[in-house]
Image (cartoon, rainbow, N blue to C red):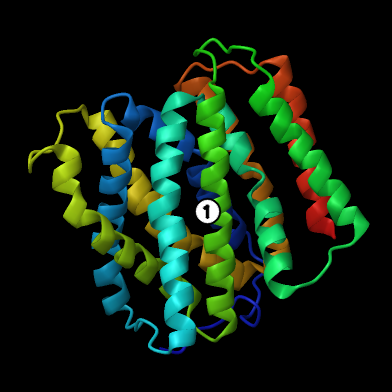
């Protein structure tokens, strides 16, 4: 299937791409909140497996409908498998377990450093040395991460645990590795949306055979509609619909224009955690937020 790259697609000056990108970023920012709501009633491992399984069940028919074929060349298959494993297997497991153990505010802010981790992986693979300004931005952002994780001031929703924060940090490393693998696949000429759809399908194939063992049978756990709705939202809306909307916004609004909107993702998570979960920011969290945002902005400008 012939696809249009976001780098070459005609750009639109209307506000429609901006509004779509903004809606996607708000949905992505709500992921920590949805995860907290789901794992309050369902085991985090089961939550992650069902989330990925439902996502794959939607991704496969969508890929077939859009006539996006899976890659066939060895140089494309391995990046797809790596991207799918990191983004839809390793990340959901580690992130969901970690998010249950810490606050949604902490989880959202730790994910804010994803551009830094992605840049480190990309620089290592491409064997290039970033300039000192980029490293300065990394140092500021990492300082904010360390302050966030080691600053043990409780919020009204309960104290965030160091172990939970560290698990989300490790999950972020896998997510960044998946992003770089997906980017390498895109550079080889493969469809960007195909990376998401077939990566989710591959992860579902890996997870589904083990789901009965995690459940202790073939019966789904009893939970409220809030928990199941949160899982379905993350599987179908946040992941599949979100990525489709994001790619469309990039193609029609421009990468530079849309990229700045992504900085709102952690902020939307903080606001939603405040109103939905009753979490309250602490002085440590506010200082860490400023440091992480400042570091990411400095690094991305370089």
Q: Characterize the local packing of mark 1: few (<14), some (14-19) or many (20 or more) Cα atoms within 10 angstroms.
A: many
Residue at 73% x, 26% y is 147
Residue at 60% x, 75% y is 6
Residue at 46% x, 20% y is 277
Q: Is residue 36 above or below residue 93?
A: above
Q: Is residue 31 above or below residue 149?
A: below
> Can I make out residue 67 in this image?
yes
Percent x, y for residue 135? 85, 52
Q: Quadrant of residue 57?
A: bottom left
Q: How many marks?
A: 1
Taking the image as shown, residue 184 lies to the left or right of residue 80, namely right
Residue at 65% x, 78% y is 7
Q: Is residue 300 above or below residue 171?
A: below
Q: Is residue 166 above or below residue 284?
A: below
Percent x, y for residue 35? 40, 35
Taking the image as shown, residue 5 lies to the left or right of residue 257, namely left
Q: Quadrant of the N terminus?
A: bottom left
> Can I make out residue 241 in this image?
no
Q: Which residue is mark 1?
A: 174
Residue farthest along the left direction in this orientation: 218
Is residue 139 or residue 109 the one in the foreground? 139
Q: Quadrant of the C terminus?
A: bottom right
Is residue 276 or residue 131 the one in the foreground? 131
Taking the image as shown, residue 148 lies to the left or right of residue 278, namely right
Q: Which SS class for mark 1?
A: helix
């Amino acid at each position: 299937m012939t696809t249009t790259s976001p780098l070459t697609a005609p750009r639109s000056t209307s506000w429609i791409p901006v509004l779509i990108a903004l809606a996607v970023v708000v949905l992505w920012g709500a992921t920590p909140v949805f995860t907290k709501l789901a794992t309050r009633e369902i085991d985090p491992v089961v939550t992650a497996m069902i989330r990925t399984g439902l996502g794959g069940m939607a991704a496969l028919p969508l890929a077939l409908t859009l006539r996006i074929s899976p890659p066939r060349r060895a140089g494309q298959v391995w990046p797809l498998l790596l991207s799918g494993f990191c983004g839809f297997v390793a990340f959901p497991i580690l992130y969901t377990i970690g998010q249950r153990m810490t606050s949604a505010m902490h989880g959202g802010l730790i994910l804010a450093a994803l551009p830094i981790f992605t840049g480190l992986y990309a620089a290592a693979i491409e064997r290039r040395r970033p300039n000192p300004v980029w490293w300065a931005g990394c140092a500021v952002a990492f300082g904010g991460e360390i302050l966030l994780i080691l600053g043990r001031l409780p919020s009204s929703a309960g104290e965030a645990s160091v172990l939970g924060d560290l698990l989300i940090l490790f999950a972020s490393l896998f997510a960044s590795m998946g992003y770089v693998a997906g980017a390498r696949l895109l550079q080889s000429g493969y469809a960007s949306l195909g990376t998401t759809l077939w990566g989710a399908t591959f992860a579902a194939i890996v997870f589904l055979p083990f789901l009965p063992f995690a459940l202790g049978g073939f019966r789904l756990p009893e939970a409220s509609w809030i928990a199941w709705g949160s899982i379905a939202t993350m599987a179908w809306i946040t992941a599949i619909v979100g990525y489709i909307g994001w790619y469309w916004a990039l193609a029609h609004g421009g990468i530079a224009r849309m990229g700045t909107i992504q900085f709102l993702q952690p902020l939307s998570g903080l606001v939603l955690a405040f109103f939905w979960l009753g979490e309250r920011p602490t002085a440590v969290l506010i200082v860490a937020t400023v440091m992480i945002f400042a570091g990411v902005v400095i690094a991305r400008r370089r």
